[in-house]
Image (spheres, rainbow, N blue to C red):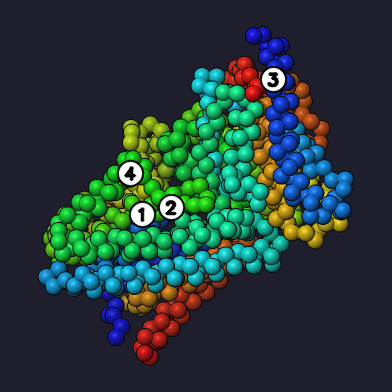
């Protein structure tokens, strides 16, 4: 199969994934937004906000080890650590369960195994030794690491977090394990908190330094909050957290699909995107993977 | 009548203070607890001394108390511990909820593994009652409940029927768990008990065995000088490795890997060996400590004599400390106030408990 045909199939598949995801996310988001106060939110499109975030770091490096595992075994193993993003509408299977379902439904023959070792409130310094042990035991292809939230609350010194992140990511790369950082959470009351902002900046800097994928959870919810406007400011912030988690699930699926099945786009950073960075060449370690047939 | 100041109560009091300090992450005084130069920390010491204290219930080796009596006592203790765990978990949840409301920050609802309680309350409350869902830093009492409910009765029976088999059977369960990665799952969250009871029971049994006048305890006392000679290089060597982070690559060790990894959940062999070496070495220190700082020893011993109420209040105070640090920011002044006030309150709790027992 030539690359053009593969790209075409990938595009077709991507539409299918998008349809599946959009249906699922729209239904879930509808529960949160449309029903309780539909009169106040008639023109609100949360999917649009999710979409904006999805576009945010499309130029980050691929997932070479995950792509290799997919090519060789048609199976990828994901280790999820750190604070597990949990929302009211995902409790049955968790955010990673949604991701697993999205991908396995969309791609025939793809087996996604998610080893969920997330602990809500876990600090990065505690996660680091646990990641090493879990990698030794589980041998994952990629680590999803929700990092920064607990450290933001615990007032972890930013330099120490930076050091921990660098050590962990360096170690994982040296052991041929890809990393996806799931970043900070947006909370109105912390939006101007200097320490919280510093922690967020550390994570963004780390992403750029190591050229890895980051899930822009913060940007998603911040955008949602902005779109919703002042009319609903009085509502609980946990609603925002909830929607942000759904965006994250959507984005993780989208990002994985994009990095694994679609040839990286050779274009510059998206103007205004918070995670924008210098364009990178298609990852040499990430061979074009023929997309599996759509179900 | 109150117990005289002794080494066990002193070390238990020390462990309670260390746990309180360590459970306020990144506070200035955290760097002075022994976990910074030791693979094991206060949790091992706490569980070891809990096993040691079981001797008071079981009775002396040559005149053990009736099994029914022991079972009644340990079951009663397990119920007390369970009620204490429920109470502090409930208060901790309320504290997190109050912090989330007062600071308009829903992230507190996910702090310390509390997310399921707020976002999946139906199942999480069942889990809390079954001890299958535990808040972070509130996970040692559930272990203690299991040890009292399951392990202590077995100890009582073994101790009378086949005392020589107690430690070997405990070790067999431990090593099987480590080799095959056996653990106890949490629910409704997907995970495992932070303190795997299948492994931590060995620490408890070791504490009990070392307290005995016969068997392994007697052997250890006879050979304590040799054990200390062996223990010193282990403690120092591993402290250096810990300080300079000179660990082997966990992905390069042979299978079964848990045998060679560093881990608290499974209290992996290297951590266990270091803890035993530390116990052997530090057992020589008490006479000097009591001579040099008798007031400190009396203070720690008063906490140790009242370990359950002090532990419960300490757990809540450390959570309060986490919230305060998050709300007002960090500085050495804040940390000093938190640690100083907290330890003073722990002493007041111990004093009140003893005043109550004296009054009654």
- The residue where tag 3 is placed is A10
Chain containing the residue with disc 2: B
Chain containing the residue with disc 1: B
Q: The N terminus of chain B lies in which quarter of the figure?
A: bottom left
- The residue where tag 1 is placed is B197
SS state under label 4: helix
Asked if labels 2 and 3 touch by Cβ distance under 8 angstroms, the answer is no
Asked if labels 1 and 2 touch by Cβ distance under 8 angstroms, the answer is yes
SS state under label 2: loop
Chain containing the residue with disc 4: B
- Horizontal and vertical percent for residue B234? 28, 49
Distance Cα–Cα, label 1 vs label 3? 49 Å
Task: First in sequence, mark 4 or 1: give its number.
Answer: 4
Distance Cα–Cα, label 3 vs label 4? 45 Å
SS state under label 3: helix
Mark in front: 3 vs 4: 3
- The residue where tag 2 is placed is B193
Q: Are marks 3 and 4 on the same chain?
A: no
- Horizontal and vertical percent for residue A119? 53, 49
Q: A282 and B279: which one is in front?
A: A282
Crowding at mark 3 (Cα within 10 Å: few <14, some 14-19, many 20+): many
Chain containing the residue with disc 3: A
Q: The C terminus of chain B lies in which quarter of the figure?
A: bottom left
Distance Cα–Cα, label 4 vs label 1? 12 Å
């Amino acid at each position: 199969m030539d690359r053009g045909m593969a790209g075409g199939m990938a595009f077709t598949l991507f539409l299918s994934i998008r349809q599946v995801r959009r249906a699922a996310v729209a239904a879930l988001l509808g529960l949160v937004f449309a029903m309780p106060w539909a009169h106040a939110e008639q023109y609100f499109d949360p999917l649009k906000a999710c979409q904006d975030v999805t576009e945010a770091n499309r130029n980050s490096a691929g997932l070479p080890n995950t792509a290799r595992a997919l090519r060789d075994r048609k199976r990828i193993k994901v280790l999820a650590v750190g604070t597990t993003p949990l929302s009211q509408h995902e409790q049955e299977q968790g955010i990673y369960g949604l991701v697993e379902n999205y991908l396995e439904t969309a791609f025939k023959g793809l087996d996604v195994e998610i080893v969920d070792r997330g602990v809500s409130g876990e600090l990065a310094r505690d996660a680091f030794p646990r990641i090493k042990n879990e990698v030794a035991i589980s041998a994952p292809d990629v680590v999803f690491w929700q990092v920064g939230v607990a450290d933001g609350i615990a007032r972890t010194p930013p330099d120490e977090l930076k050091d921990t992140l660098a050590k962990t990511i360096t170690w994982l790369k040296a052991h041929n394990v890809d990393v996806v950082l799931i970043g900070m959470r947006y909370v109105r009351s912390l939006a101007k908190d200097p320490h919280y902002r510093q922690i967020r900046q550390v994570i963004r800097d780390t992403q750029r330094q190591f050229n890895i994928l980051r899930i822009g959870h913060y940007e998603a919810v911040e955008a949602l909050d902005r779109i919703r406007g002042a009319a609903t400011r009085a509502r609980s912030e946990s609603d925002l957290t909830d929607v942000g988690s759904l965006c994250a699930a959507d984005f993780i699926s989208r990002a994985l699909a994009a990095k694994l099945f679609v040839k990286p786009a050779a274009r510059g950073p998206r103007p205004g995107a918070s995670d924008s960075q210098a364009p990178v060449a298609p990852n040499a370690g990430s061979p074009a993977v023929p997309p599996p047939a759509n179900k | 009548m109150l117990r005289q100041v002794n080494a066990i109560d002193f070390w238990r009091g020390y462990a309670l203070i260390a746990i309180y300090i360590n459970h306020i992450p990144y506070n200035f005084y955290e760097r002075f607890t022994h976990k910074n130069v030791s693979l094991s920390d206060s949790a091992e010491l706490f569980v070891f001394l809990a096993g040691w204290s079981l001797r008071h219930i079981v009775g002396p080796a040559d005149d053990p108390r009736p099994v029914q009596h022991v079972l009644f006592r340990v079951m009663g203790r397990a119920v007390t511990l369970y009620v204490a765990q429920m109470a502090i978990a409930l208060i901790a949840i309320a504290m997190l909820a109050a912090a989330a409301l007062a600071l308009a920050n829903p992230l507190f609802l996910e702090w310390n593994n509390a997310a399921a309680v707020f976002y999946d309350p139906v199942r999480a409350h069942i889990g809390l009652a079954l001890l299958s869902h535990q808040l972070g830093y509130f996970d040692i009492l559930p272990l203690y409940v299991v040890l009292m409910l399951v392990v202590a009765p077995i100890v009582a029976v073994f101790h009378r029927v086949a005392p020589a088999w107690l430690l070997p059977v405990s070790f067999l369960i431990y090593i099987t768990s480590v080799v095959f990665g056996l653990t106890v799952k949490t629910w409704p969250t997907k995970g495992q008990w932070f303190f795997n009871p299948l492994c931590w029971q060995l620490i408890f049994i070791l504490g009990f065995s070392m307290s005995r006048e016969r068997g392994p305890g007697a052997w250890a006392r006879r050979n304590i000088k040799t054990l200390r000679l062996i223990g010193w290089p282990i403690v120092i060597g591993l402290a250096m490795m810990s300080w300079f982070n000179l660990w082997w690559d966990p992905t390069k060790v042979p299978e079964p890997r848990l045998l060679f990894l560093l881990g608290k959940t499974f209290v992996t062999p290297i951590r266990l060996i270091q803890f035993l070496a530390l116990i052997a070495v530090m057992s020589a220190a008490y006479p000097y400590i009591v001579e040099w700082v008798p007031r400190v020893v009396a203070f720690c011993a008063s906490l140790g004599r009242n370990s359950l109420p002090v532990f419960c209040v300490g757990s809540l105070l450390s959570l309060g400390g986490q919230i305060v640090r998050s709300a007002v920011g960090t500085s050495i002044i804040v940390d000093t106030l938190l640690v100083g006030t907290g330890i003073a309150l722990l002493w007041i709790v111990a004093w009140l408990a003893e005043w109550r027992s004296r009054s009654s």
